């Protein structure tokens, strides 16, 4: 047996054979009928329909043979020679006498195959993919008529095989289409996407159920399906642009129609719709006749887009108008990627020049080690600063900056640093100025303190010495009057005695004022106001009885002030005696003392009388000045209110007055209730 011949196009022929799925066994009644017809035509007990692959013969139909296997090595088969026959058929009358097959195992084995007649099965592309053959186990000859009829049957066999293949392909295609349609429906339903069909010639448009769910309308709302009825719900501002996009697709200037527009929902609100479509049918003249497309509700996306745009605009505005510099740097190289105007302004560089720098080039060498440590910390924590250093200007000079920043990543995963850089030159100048001013103030305070000490000493000395001299003059006058009694009636002596008394009174007043001004807060204490009031009322009882003045007190035991007890008592005494001294002769006199804590946690003391009052329009500016007298009275010296105001202010308090002539006067005193 010799090796089987192969057609010149065998490699391509093998690919054609694979299209018919030769390895799959089929039970095809048509093929079985045709193989039986071939056996009858040639008068043989058996006939086969085969496909010849690269190395294998596949039996697709076998008449008159019960085959356990349907695949045989190509090299042993007769049909392998048939598909290469130049005559278009092959006949073997006695295989034992044919050198091609005499040693073939099908010839030498049990039930030897001795005679064979076969014709190729050629497909529409012209490739011999297999054969129709008849087999006999006895030597036999075949007529031309038999071979011609066998060729005709072979053509029918090929048609049947082609039909079977196309049927399977069509079935598979239908299954794929059904699967694609199912998947498409799932996608449409899952994404709430509506579909539309537009019959352009008849100007009618139909929508899927999803569209009605989106828009809120029902099919009854648009019974005629005319396109004009759909246009009525498109926002008038969007209609022209929508029609333009449709026309561009109709004219072939755009491969597909795409537009975003608003429609009015049935509830009156407007929805944003994204629509895409494509013409899938044109008439003979090229005019579009049918169009198919999708509608999708993108209202929420539009809201998000507007929000994003608003935030982007806000960030852009903040970035451009920021009072401090903002920069984006590459983490590895330090190169500036983005900068705003504020960071560039003090450097002397242009924006373009600045973007060609790295932050290492702007940093003096003495800060580089610190910068490395900051970068390590930035990698660990994600942020750095605030941190002070200097930047180098284009002209080489330096200026101080305050930096802080965060680590981030760009869309490509690259590490970047957002930094906020504040030029603190002005702040540093102010700090130096404040430092100089502070030193000046400290120096002035020291001088003032020394001067105050000297003034205190001087006041003590003057007060002491004047009091001594005054007492000496008064004593000498007493001695003179005792030794010369007749001098008492002399006018010059009387004037001298009066002048001496006035001098002693003035020195007494000055001494009280000196005490107020030299007292320090270290002497302050918590004073129970009620006990101080009671003490004063007790001490002036003879005066209140003589003047028929009633004193009313509304002060709780819990009310306390923080100051000097002597001052508190002196203030109360002055206020009460003034109320008695300047009582109205026209009505029963009354003095009311109240005290409560106000919202500022201060003690508000009110001392009110119904006396003769003060004309504030005339005297307000002079009320608390020394030696200012507003009523004629034998005891009036013009010192009391001056002394009261000094005592109150020395205890960090305040005093105010309300008064109406011939109605009365109210003094409002505020004192702290604790050390502050």
Image: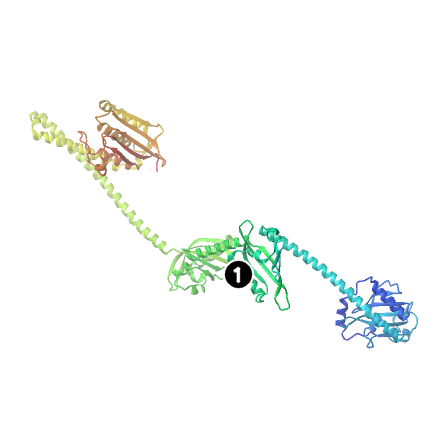
Please determine whether, in this image, residue 370 is positioned above or below residue 13: above
Q: Residue at x 24, y 43 (%)?
A: 451
Q: Quadrant of residue 533?
A: top left
Percent across and percent down for residue 643 are: 24, 34
- Vertical position of residue 422 compared to residue 77: above or below: above
Q: Tag 1: Cα neighbours inside 10 Å, few (<14), some, or many (≥20)?
A: some
Q: Label 1 belongs to which residue?
A: 241
Which element carries disc 1, helix, strand or loop?
Answer: helix
* Residue 376 in sight here: no
Judged left or right of residue 466, residue 99 is right
168 or 227, which is in the foreground?
Answer: 227
In the picture as drawn, the residue positioned furthest to the right comes out as: 138
- Report the front residue among 218 and 487: 218
Q: Residue at x 26, y 36 (%)?
A: 645
- Point out residue 339 in the picture as x, y percentages from the top left corner: 44, 60
Task: Specify whether 514 is left or right of 284.
Answer: left
């Amino acid at each position: 047996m010799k090796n089987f011949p192969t057609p010149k196009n065998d490699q391509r022929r093998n690919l054609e054979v694979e299209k018919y799925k030769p390895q799959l066994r089929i039970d095809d009644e048509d093929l079985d009928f045709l193989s039986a017809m071939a056996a009858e035509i040639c008068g043989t007990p058996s006939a086969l329909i085969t496909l010849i692959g690269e190395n294998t013969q596949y039996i697709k139909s076998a008449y008159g043979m019960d085959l356990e296997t349907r695949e045989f090595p190509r090299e042993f088969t007769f049909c392998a020679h048939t598909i290469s026959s130049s005559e278009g058929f092959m006949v073997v009358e006695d295989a034992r006498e044919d050198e091609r097959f005499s040693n073939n195992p099908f010839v030498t084995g049990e039930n030897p195959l001795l005679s064979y007649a076969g014709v190729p099965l050629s497909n529409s592309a012209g490739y011999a993919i297999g054969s129709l053959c008849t087999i006999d186990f006895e030597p036999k000859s075949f007529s031309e008529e038999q071979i011609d009829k066998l060729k005709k049957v072979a053509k029918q066999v090929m048609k049947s095989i082609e039909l079977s293949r196309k049927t399977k392909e069509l079935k598979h295609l239908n299954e794929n289409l059904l699967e694609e349609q199912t998947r498409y429906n799932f996608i449409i339903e899952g994404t709430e996407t509506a579909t539309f069909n537009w019959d352009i010639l008849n100007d009618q448009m139909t929508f899927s159920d999803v569209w009605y769910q989106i828009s809120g309308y029902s099919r009854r709302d648009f019974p005629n399906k005319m396109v004009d009825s759909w246009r009525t719900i498109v926002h008038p501002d969007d209609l022209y642009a929508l029609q333009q996009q449709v026309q561009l697709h109709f004219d072939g200037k755009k491969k597909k129609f795409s537009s975003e527009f608003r429609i009015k929902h049935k509830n009156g609100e407007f929805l944003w719709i994204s629509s895409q479509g494509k013409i899938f049918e044109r008439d003979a003249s090229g005019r579009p006749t049918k169009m198919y497309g999708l509608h999708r509700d993108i209202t929420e996306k539009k809201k998000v887009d507007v929000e994003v745009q608003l935030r982007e605009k806000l960030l852009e505005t903040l970035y451009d108008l920021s009072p401090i510099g903002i920069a984006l740097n590459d983490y590895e190289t330090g190169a500036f990627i983005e900068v705003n105007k504020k960071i560039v302004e003090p450097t002397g560089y242009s924006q373009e020049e600045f973007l060609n720098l790295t932050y290492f080039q702007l940093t003096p060498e003495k800060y580089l080690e610190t910068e490395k440590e900051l970068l390590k910390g930035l990698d660990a924590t994600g942020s750095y600063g605030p941190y002070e250093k200097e930047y180098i200007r284009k002209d080489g000079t330096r200026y101080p900056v305050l930096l802080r920043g965060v680590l981030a990543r760009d869309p490509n995963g690259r590490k970047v640093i957002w930094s906020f850089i504040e030029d603190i030159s002005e702040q540093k100048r102010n700090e130096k100025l404040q430092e100089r001013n502070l030193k000046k103030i400290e120096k002035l305070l020291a001088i003032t303190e020394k001067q105050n000490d000297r003034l205190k000493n001087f006041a003590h000395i003057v007060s002491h010495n004047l009091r001594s001299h005054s007492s000496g003059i008064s004593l000498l006058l007493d001695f003179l009057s005792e030794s010369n009694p007749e001098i008492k009636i002399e006018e010059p002596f009387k004037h001298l005695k009066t002048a001496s008394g006035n001098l002693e009174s003035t020195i007494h007043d000055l001494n009280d004022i000196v005490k107020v001004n030299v007292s320090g807060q270290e002497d302050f204490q918590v004073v129970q106001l009620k006990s101080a009031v009671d003490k004063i009322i007790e001490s002036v009882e003879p005066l209140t009885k003589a003047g028929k003045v009633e004193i009313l007190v509304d002060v709780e035991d819990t009310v306390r002030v923080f100051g000097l007890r002597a001052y508190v008592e002196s203030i109360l005494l002055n206020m009460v005696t003034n109320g008695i001294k300047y009582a109205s002769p026209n009505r029963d006199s009354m003095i009311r003392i109240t005290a409560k804590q106000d919202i500022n946690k201060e003690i508000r003391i009110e001392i009110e009388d119904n006396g003769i009052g003060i004309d504030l329009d005339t005297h307000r500016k002079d009320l608390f000045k020394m030696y200012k007298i507003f009523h004629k009275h034998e005891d009036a010296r013009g010192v009391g209110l001056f002394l009261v105001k000094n005592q109150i202010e020395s205890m960090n308090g305040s005093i105010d007055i309300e008064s109406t002539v011939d109605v009365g006067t109210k003094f409002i005193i505020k004192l702290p209730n604790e050390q502050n």
